[in-house]
Image: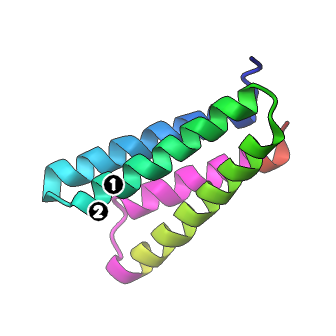
Amino acid sequence: MNFSPSAIALLAYGIVAIAGGIIGFAKSKSKISLISGSLSGVGLLISGIATAQGQGWGKIAGIAIATLLVIVFVTRFLKTKKFMPAGLMIIGGAATLFVAILTS
């Protein structure tokens, strides 16, 4: 396996997404936070592992998931005007996309 910057970024963002879903559930009993955070996080982890294994679809899938998360959280930030968790997920997603798009 080759843990390129792209693979590492996807794996890290996946962990953050899962952790965010768990925290959202713990703080507000939001089952949708737990489900969406877990699904998107696992998708990012799978994408990161596939990218590390040199499978091209992994990076494409990871970029797609990260893009969707950024869109969702930009919408949420504009609605709530609260930095947490939307701002953190936007910054993490933008950084992930930057690394994944510009590196191998």
Labels 1 & 2 near each other (Cβ < 8 A):
yes
Residues rendered magenta in the picture: 79-100
Q: What label does residue 99 carry, if any?
A: none
Where the N terminus falls, by quadrant?
top right
Amino acid bearing label 1: Ile
What residue occupies the far bottom of the structure in this picture? Answer: 79
Category of crowding for the residue at label 1, using alpha-carbon neighbours closer than 10 angstroms: few (below 14), some (14–19), many (at least 20): some
Q: Nearer the viewer, residue 95 or 19?
A: 19
Q: Is residue 29 above or below residue 50?
A: below
What's the magenta bit mostly, secondary-structure-wise?
helix
Category of crowding for the residue at label 2, using alpha-carbon neighbours closer than 10 angstroms: few (below 14), some (14–19), many (at least 20): few
Give the image location of residue 86, x and y in percent: 41, 63
Amino acid bearing label 2: Ile
Q: Is residue 18 above or below residue 11?
A: below
Q: Which residue is mark 1?
A: 35
Q: Is residue 103 above or below residue 30?
A: above
Asked if residue 94 is among those painted magenta in the image, a careful observer would answer: yes
Q: Which residue is mark 2?
A: 32
Residue at horizontal 34 percent and vertical 48 percent from the top: 20
User: Alpha carbon of mark 1 to alpha carbon of mark 2: how far?
Assistant: 5 Å
